[in-house]
Image (cartoon, rainbow, N blue to C red):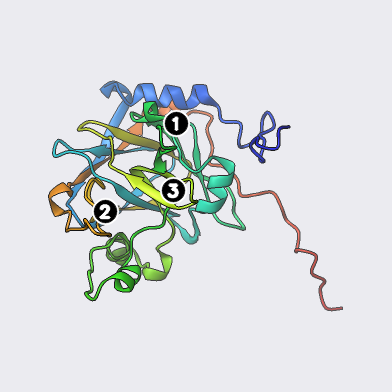
Amino acid sequence: MSMTSAYYQAPPGSVLDVDRDFYDRLAEAAETTDRREMVERFVIPIRSGKAWEVPAGHLCRILITPEGPQCGDFNVWNRHNPRERMWTSRTRQLQGTHVTRYDRLWSTLPYLRPLLTITKDTLEWYGVDEDGGRIHDLLGARCDPYVNRLFSERDFDFHCHSNLTRAVLPWGLTELDVHDVLNIFTVTGINADGNYFMKPSPATPGDFFEFFAEQDLLCALSTCPAGDLSVPMWGPDARDPIEVCRPLAVEVYRPAEELTRGWTPPATAPYRGVHGLGFPS
């Protein structure tokens, strides 16, 4: 193995060895109304957030609306146990710094299993640009009011962290449950100096990011107050980018029963040890 090859190699038949035919069938079926049923649709206004359920075995699609491109900060938990939630650092190691079709979002220890699998991404074509940028980012954190106060003398309560906090309160969660995000429709990378950069989103109306729920999920999404990232919020040219802030739409589908026949939610990680700890005699 090359020293620059992916460190985590998926052996055949492992949970990293995705059944692409299964997810392709789900993606294809999502385009035919007789093989899916829409069970929920809503639009998240600018600079706000919303939480919603996606039952295991359902598809969820996050869409760019006719108003234009918009970046979204995404959180996800096991609906029945919020301690099991997306683990971005391990997902980066197992999948990559940016995710697309067939990639999975992985949960925290001691569970370590897929929360969801991406079935379709209309921006998959973006690949890697001339600056090393990629789309659907797991590198960056959500914007938050605490960092804002490091750079500004005013409070602003519509950062993604705040939007997500408000979104999950009706579900019995708090600010402490909000975690590192997947930045959907967001182009980012690391420059030659090792610094994080963001670029304007290439998404256009009708683009979408779709996933299959591997277990009962609670999802939350913030429409980022930076909009499509075409206007800087910091630095000498900074200004309020509200004119490039737009809504995002969400649709949840129940696929035809025959499409998921034989599928079962993934089991938790098989490790059952006690970490080398002894028990009192």
- As shown in the figure, which amino acid type bears the numbered disc 2? Cys
Name the residue carrying label 1. Answer: 101
- The residue at 26%/55% (across/down) is 50
Q: Is residue 166 left or right of residue 101?
A: left
* Front tag of 3 and 1: 1
Residue 27, percent across and down? Answer: 38, 26
- The residue at 14%/35% (across/down) is 66
Q: Quadrant of residue 49?
A: bottom left
In front here: 197 or 183? 197
Q: State the separation of the CA atoms marked 2 and 3.
A: 25 Å
- The residue at 54%/40% (across/down) is 95
**Secondary-structure class at tag 1:** loop
- The residue at 13%/39% (across/down) is 67
Of all residues shown, which one is farthest toward the bottom?
281
**Secondary-structure class at tag 3:** loop
- As shown in the figure, which amino acid type bears the numbered disc 1? Arg
Residue 239, percent across and down? Answer: 17, 58
Residue 108 seen in render:
yes
Q: Is residue 225 left or right of residue 185?
A: left
Residue 144, percent across and down? Answer: 33, 65
Name the residue carrying label 2. Answer: 224
Q: State the separation of the CA atoms marked 2 and 1.
A: 23 Å
Q: Which mark is residue 216?
A: 3
Quadrant where the C terminus is found in the figure: bottom right
**Secondary-structure class at tag 2:** loop
Query: Is the residue under label 1 in contact with that under label 3 (CB below 8 Å)?
Result: no
Q: State the separation of the CA atoms marked 3 and 1.
A: 20 Å
